[in-house]
Amino acid sequence: MADSKITSTIVQCDLDGCGWSQDISPSDVENWHNKACPKCGYSPIINDDDLSVFHVALGLAHLSSALDPCGDMPTETVTFNTKKLRESNHG
């Protein structure tokens, strides 16, 4: 069976002008939940909604692997920018 693959996870500060970001392992995402930015102190880096989106993406990756046990299907890169998701919910 093919493994589900989330190959890149980047956490970033959403405060305009800060610019802090870091590549992390998918297994470290929950460690950033409700944590402040190490550069400017803006909080949270990952809020409850961000974490929910990540868990949905992880579930989709697992589902994709289950539907393609041999790993023959083409892959696709998907980027979730939760800052833009949050802005659309409040704008």
Image (cartoon, rainbow, N blue to C red):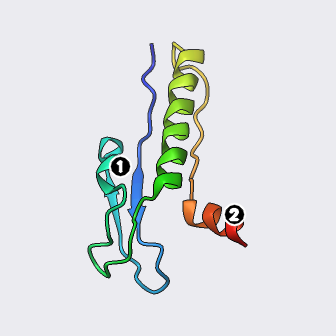
Image point (50%, 25%), residue name: 62
Q: How many numbered callouts?
A: 2
Residue 48 lies, with reference to residue 19, above or below; the image says: above
Residue 21 is at least partly visible in this image: yes
Disc 1 marks which residue?
29
Residue 68 is at least partly visible in this image: no
Quadrant in which the C terminus is drawn: bottom right
Image point (51%, 13%), residue name: 70
Q: Residues within 10 Å of mark 1 (few under 14, many from 20)?
A: some
Question: In terms of depth relative to the viewer, which is nearer, 77 or 66?
Answer: 66
Image point (50%, 83%), residue name: 16
**Quadrant of residue 80 within the rendered picture:** bottom right
Asked if the residues shown at circle 2 and circle 1 are in contact, with their CB atoms under 8 angstroms apart, the answer is no
**Quadrant of residue 63 within the rendered picture:** top right
Q: Residues within 10 Å of mark 2 (few under 14, many from 20)?
A: few
* Residue 68 image point, x, y percent: 57, 17
SS of the residue under disc 1: helix
Residue 86 lies, with reference to residue 77, above or below; the image says: below
Quadrant in which the N terminus is drawn: top left
Q: Nearer the viewer, mark 2 or mark 1?
A: 2
Disc 2 marks which residue?
89
Q: Would residue 35 appear left or right of 84 to someone viewing this image?
A: left
**Quadrant of residue 19 within the rendered picture:** bottom left
Q: What amino acid type should be assigned to the residue bearing mark 2?
A: Asn
